[in-house]
Amino acid sequence: MKYVLTLLALLALPTAHAVEYRTVLPAQSRIGFAFVQMGVSIPGSFKRFAAQMNFDPARPEAARAVLEIDLASIDAGSAEADEESAGKLWFNRAAYPKARFVSSQVRALGKQRFELHGTLTLKGKSRPLVIPVTFTPGKDVATFDGAFVLRRLDFGIGEGMWADLDTVANDIKVTFRIAASGK
């Protein structure tokens, strides 16, 4: 009977829960990209974005994320490139000021690696996307790092004379780090 009471007492103790990350920390996060123009790799970034997430490392399959990027916050290496990106042949920011990614599934791959499945909407076109992500837990802040290749012509980015792949390559490497806390 003593063992049964001890077992019941242990079961009644509050269980430790993993931290659930919900608060994105924009100042510690970044979204970058690199494209190749006439054989030269040019890095860039987006300075403003909003993200909502819910990630519990103990239940990754229940994770959700929404990311909206303010396309006007682009830094494509020069003021001229930033201005050109606003036009109809590129992002057409007057009609489509934001890019949006909405997750639909998270798949655990082991060793803090995951696949984030979802839909990217850019310039009025929506396409499925699978993004590999590495989760790095921390005492107060965790990071989610990933990279993927975006095929710009799939979204109508760089149309007309810019559709020539000898001038601007089709593949754009996108990298990100999203920092989040459980607070």
Image (cartoon, rainbow, N blue to C red):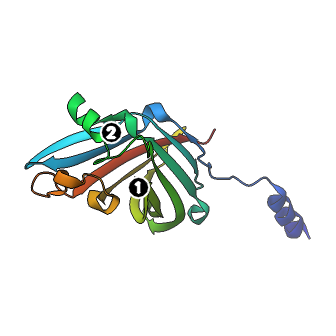
How many other residues sit within 10 Å of disc 1, few (<14), some (14-19) or many (≥20)?
Answer: some
Residue lying furthest right: 1
- Identify the residue position indicated by label 2 in the image: 86
- Residue 6, how many percent across, how many down? 84, 62
Asked whether residue 78 is in view, the answer is no
- Residue 50, how many percent across, how many down? 51, 40
How many other residues sit within 10 Å of disc 2, few (<14), some (14-19) or many (≥20)?
Answer: some
Find numbered disc 2 in the image and state the secondary structure of the residue it sits on.
loop
- At 56% from the left and 62% from the top, the residue drawn is 60
- Residue 73, how many percent across, how many down? 38, 34
Out of 131 and 1, give the one closest to the viewer.
Answer: 131
The kind of residue tagged 1 is Thr
The kind of residue tagged 2 is Ala
- At 52% from the left and 60% from the top, the residue drawn is 103
Quarter of the image where the C terminus is located: top right
Residue lying furthest top: 79
Find numbered disc 1 in the image and state the secondary structure of the residue it sits on.
strand
- At 45% from the left and 44% from the top, the residue drawn is 98
- Identify the residue position indicated by label 1 in the image: 134
